[in-house]
Image: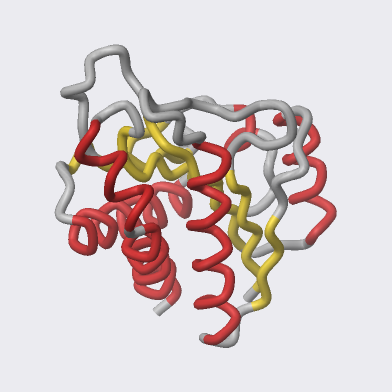
Amino acid sequence: MKIFLNPGHGGNDPGAVSKNGLKEKDVVKRICDILAQKLRNAGYSVMVYQEQHSFTEVSKEENKSGADLFVSVHCNSYKDAAARGVQVFYYPGSDKGKRIAETIQKSLVKHTGLFDRGAKSEVFHVLKRTKSPAVLVETAFISNPEEEKLLRDKPEIFAEGILAGIKNYIS
């Protein structure tokens, strides 16, 4: 099985930035690097792509890759620092996407102990334009001081949660 990982944002786009200056693009790159190694150790073929300038470019690269699964990893953010939790999105009408989102959601909540915001459908470009089943993972709120600390200090728990979700989906 070939898995395409997309650490959200990159290049000149830092994504969300915490009050302490932690950049989403850096956090999700660390999570994806850990996840990619764990997936490879488990026997999966993995491609990590962050050199994006547009969502269209990410979709094109994924489609060229022949991947069996697309996972875009992000950090959530909101003006209210109390916002919290894990959330995984899939494209409306995608049964496979929904099943993958639900298994990753459940595993992330279990591994992180964070609030369960649920798996939900959404029309994000990277979910709509990819050929393989696709999910967009919002690991935690970088704008929430407690969740920012987890993102900064324990990226491996997010990688392990996503890995467990992928394995549960495949089995």
Q: Which quarter of the picture shows residue 40?
A: bottom right
Place of residue 63 in the rendered image (x, y in percent of width and height, measured from the top left): 78, 50
Using the image, determine if residue 161 lies above or below residue 78. Answer: below
Q: How is the image coloured?
A: secondary structure
Check the picture and name the quadrant holding the C terminus.
bottom left
* Residue sitting at the far top: 79
Residue 47 pos. (x, y %)? 71, 64
Q: Name the residue nearer the viewer: 53 or 107.
A: 53
Which quadrant does the N terminus fall into?
bottom right
Q: Is residue 79 above or below residue 112?
A: above
Total labels drawn: 0
Left or right: 25 as drawn, with respect to 145: right
Measured from the top left, where is residue 14 in percent x and y?
Answer: 60, 29
| Outermost residue toward the right in this view | 64
User: Would you say 151 lies left or right of 71 here?
Assistant: left
Q: Is residue 6 above or below residue 15?
A: below
Q: Residue at x 67, y 76 (%)?
A: 45
Residue at (35%, 72%) from the top-left corner?
168
Residue at left 46%, top 37%?
93
- Residue at left offset 42%, top offset 69%: 163
Residue 104 in the image, given as x and y percentages of width and height: 35, 57
